[in-house]
Amino acid sequence: MIIKKGNLALRQCDPSDVEIIADNMRLADVRECALVGVTPKMALEVPFIEEGATGFTITHSNKPIAMCGVTPMDNYFKMGRIWFLGTTDLHEMPLKVFRHAKICLAFLVKNYEEVENFVPYDHWENIAWLVKLGFKVEKTPYYLDDHHFYRVFYCNFQKTDTKIDKSRPIMH
């Protein structure tokens, strides 16, 4: 167990979590996977097949309800692609999960200066949730196969290199 708060816990993901979460995934997450050309199962297997990727499972009373992680994108700039896919159980406890997510986010980004991902433009609930967690939304739309996405990113100010020349603006 990495983090435990009440009935919620964050632990290393296990291959057996993939089927449980894929079979009960929220419709918005299933749609997001489809828009980028992967199945829910393929998306959840990333921590087991991508070099350097990390993956964690969020459980409620020991039942897997979500998986999240970060895949390194650029080791020099310490950038990663962050992701989160959950089950319909998340709808039953949004406030509890949100409080836990803040703690989990700090853990997920500890080795990165910045993490990012792309969210379908019409997934306003997910975008609003990410903004409340401290993510920024880039205003420029991105398109993949005619589908509109927004880039969301989170700057880990505790990890940002303090040796940056202060006379120049820092872009975050």
Image (cartoon, helix red, strand yellow):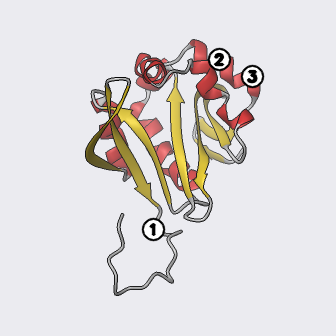
Kindly identify the amino acid type of the residue bearing the numbered disc 1.
Phe
Crowd tier of the residue under label 3, counting other residues whose Cα lies within 10 Å: few below 14, some 14–19, many 20 or above: few
Residue 140 spot, x, y in % from top left:
26, 45
Work out whether mark 1 precedes mark 3 in sequence or the reverse, and give the earlier one: 3
Residue 137 spot, x, y in % from top left:
30, 47
Residue shown at 53% from the left, 45% from the top: 81
Residue shown at 50% from the left, 44% from the top: 100
Is 127 situated left or right of 99 in this image? left
Q: Give the SS element for disc 2.
A: helix
Q: CA distance from mark 1 to mark 3?
A: 35 Å
Asked whether disc 2 touches disc 1, contact meaning CB atoms under 8 Å apart, the reply is no
Label ID, residue 16 = 3
Q: Quadrant of residue 11?
A: top right
Pointer 1 residue? 157
Label ID, residue 149 = none
Crowd tier of the residue under label 1, counting other residues whose Cα lies within 10 Å: few below 14, some 14–19, many 20 or above: few
Viewer-proximal residue among 86 and 145: 145
Work out whether mark 2 precedes mark 1 in sequence or the reverse, and give the earlier one: 2
Kindly identify the amino acid type of the residue bearing the numbered disc 2.
Ile
Q: Give the SS element for disc 3.
A: helix
Is 103 situated left or right of 63 in this image? left
Quarter of the image that includes the N terminus: top right
Viewer-proximal residue among 148 and 48: 148
Q: Quadrant of residue 170?
A: bottom left
Asked whether disc 3 touches disc 2, contact meaning CB atoms under 8 Å apart, the reply is yes
Quarter of the image that includes the C terminus: bottom left
User: Furthest residue to the left?
Assistant: 139
Residue shown at 41% from the left, 23% from the top: 91
Is 13 situated left or right of 82 in this image? right
Asked whether disc 1 touches disc 3, contact meaning CB atoms under 8 Å apart, the reply is no
Pointer 2 residue? 20
